[in-house]
Amino acid sequence: MPRGANLPAIAAFNETVVLDAIRRSGHGMSRVELVGRTGLSAQTVTNVSRRLLGQGLIREAGKQIDGPGKPRTILELEPTGSYAVGVHLDPTVITVVLLDLEGSVVEHLRRHSPVSGDSGETIAIAAEAIAELLARSGVDRPRVSGVGVAAPGPIDVGNGVVVRPPLIPGWNDLHLRDELTAATGLPSLLAKDVTAAAVAERWRDPAGASGNFVFVYYGTGVGVGMVLAREVYTGASQNAGDVGHAIVDPGGALCACGRRGCYGESVRPYRLVMQGIWAGALAAPGGVTVPDGTDLDLDVEAVDELFTELTRAADAGDAAAASILDRSIRNSALYLSNLAALLDVDRIVFGGPSWARVEQRYLAQLPERMREIDMSILTHPVDLASSAVGEDVAAVGAACLVLDAAFSPRANLV
């Protein structure tokens, strides 16, 4: 917990310290409790609380009797005091959410990503969706702190640029932050999608059910967000979590890097769809015959539809479809067991646009497959679970980052 300082020059920092303490309490705090939690003097807490009340960021929520003496007034967040927009740009779907100051989703909507993958068209759709979102909610724009946008990496956070996303080549060196700001008139920040997902999961439980976990983000590709020692880990360039090129299946699918059996290639929906077509579990678009090992140029919408067909076929008992998905589960078990041992985490959380379609099958098999491997490389049990936030997790995390940037002590100190 950050602690404040009794110096007038950092009054704004002290406001965020008090606000953060109230938010993390989950049930509100009295001024006396805030003194003990923040290290600020009683007078400073009183002054800060008065300013936060005046700004509409906190409210008085009744009295608390705690032994003899005057009842204490409880201070809690005012959810309507500020809002943040979160946007997730996936090659398949554009998700937009509006969060209040407590981090609760007030409004959300989705749009199909343009089949062309054109960056300009994508940004235009996102901007229109944000405008509709705010209109639906009735929230005044001045009360919106900004827009957080989660995008596939790698990214340049400082300049707000998507650098060279391997699955969206048309987005190379895209100045996404500035273009979205220009399109919406709202200040924006950029984050990697897997980082945003980990942030959202961390925000949902401020007390921290686990201070050390990884978030496996399953969308058009796969990536990992990390929370270590209760902090979201982003790495030296804010691009931590690119797990795609760890070898898990020697002799398996050929990856764009030139090697075979990379984890990312072995589980991404496009590759599983192509394996389904080669095995006869899926019909190729147009009914064409596709020789084994020959890839089709499928747009994101076609991949998404065929991936849904593949998972449904497996659930219905199609042996070829089931074998393809089960092999991806085996590869995931091998990779995630090693990752859990390397990082010493005790929880793995799954989510993302493609997760719901494989969730039941993965969670039915992964624990046992990991236990078989864990016996030799892990010293502790690892809990597996789906995201508590849901399918919008990356967009929610992007909005949480806006709230953090506006109101967290660390961001204001920096």
Image (cartoon, rainbow, N blue to C red):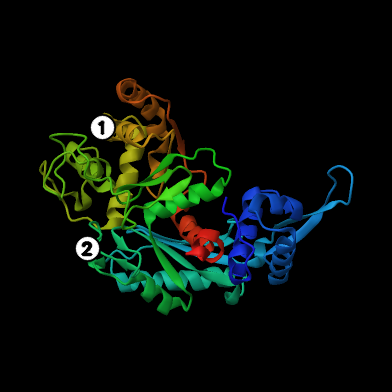
Element carrying mark 2: helix
Query: Is residue 324 visible in the rendered structure shown here?
Result: yes
- Residue 47: image location, x then y, percent: 73, 67
**Cα gap from disc 2 to disc 1, whole angstroms:** 28 Å
Query: Is residue 137 visible in the rendered structure shown here?
Result: no
Residue 169: numbered disc: 2
Q: Is residue 414 above or below residue 320?
A: below
- The quadrant in which residue 214 appears is top left
Q: Amino acid at mark 2?
A: Pro
Element carrying mark 1: helix
- Residue 332: image location, x then y, percent: 30, 35
Q: Is residue 310 left or right of residue 135?
A: left
Q: Residues within 10 Å of mark 2 (few under 14, many from 20)?
A: few
Q: Amino acid at mark 1?
A: Arg
Q: Residue at x 38, y 39 (%)?
A: 358
Which residue is disc 1 drawn over?
A: 327
- The quadrant in which residue 282 appears is top left
- The quadrant in which residue 160 appears is bottom left
